[in-house]
Amino acid sequence: MANIKSAIKRIDIAERNRLRNKSYKSAVKTLTKNYLAAVDEYAKEPTPEALTAVQVRMSAAFSKIDKAVKCGVYHGNTGARRKAKISKAFKQLEAV
């Protein structure tokens, strides 16, 4: 454990940031899984309601990724890559 006051403060700040980053990353993973599940449901039975669910979940995932990038949890390119992966899943389904 650190003895210097500023070092103790930095440890507290690092722990706070770690927990914030962890919650953002977990939320992004959860929203991505929910979105991919909605895409699978739409692939099985393409109804307007399923399409709406896919679009809503895509929007939620994109929003959380953008917020994570803005807060510095993800690098900009990482956020773009994750959004591209999400978009690709639905675009491949539409192409078929």
Image: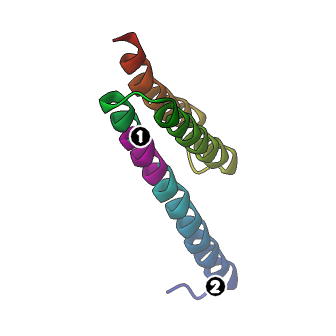
Quarter of the picture holding the C terminus: top left
Amino acid type of the residue tagged 1 in the rendering: Ala
Residue 78, compared with residue 23, is above or below; it is: above
Secondary structure beneath dot 2 equals loop
Q: Is residue 40 left or right of residue 84?
A: left
Q: Position of residue 27 (x, y in %)?
A: 51, 56
Is residue 4 or residue 60 the one in the foreground? 60
The residue segment tinted magenta is 29-37
Quickly name the residue at label 2: 4
Residue 87, compared with residue 36, is above or below; it is: above
Q: Is residue 39 left or right of residue 9?
A: left
Q: Residues within 10 Å of mark 2 (few under 14, many from 20)?
A: few
Select label 2 or label 1 by which is in front: 1
Q: Position of residue 32 (x, y in %)?
A: 44, 44
Residue 43, compared with residue 16, is above or below; it is: above
Name the residue located 69 percent from the left edge and 45 percent from the top edge: 70
Name the residue located 53 percent from the left edge and 63 percent from the top edge: 23
The magenta stretch spans residue 80: no
Name the quadrant containing residue 63.
top right
Q: Which mark is residue 38?
A: 1
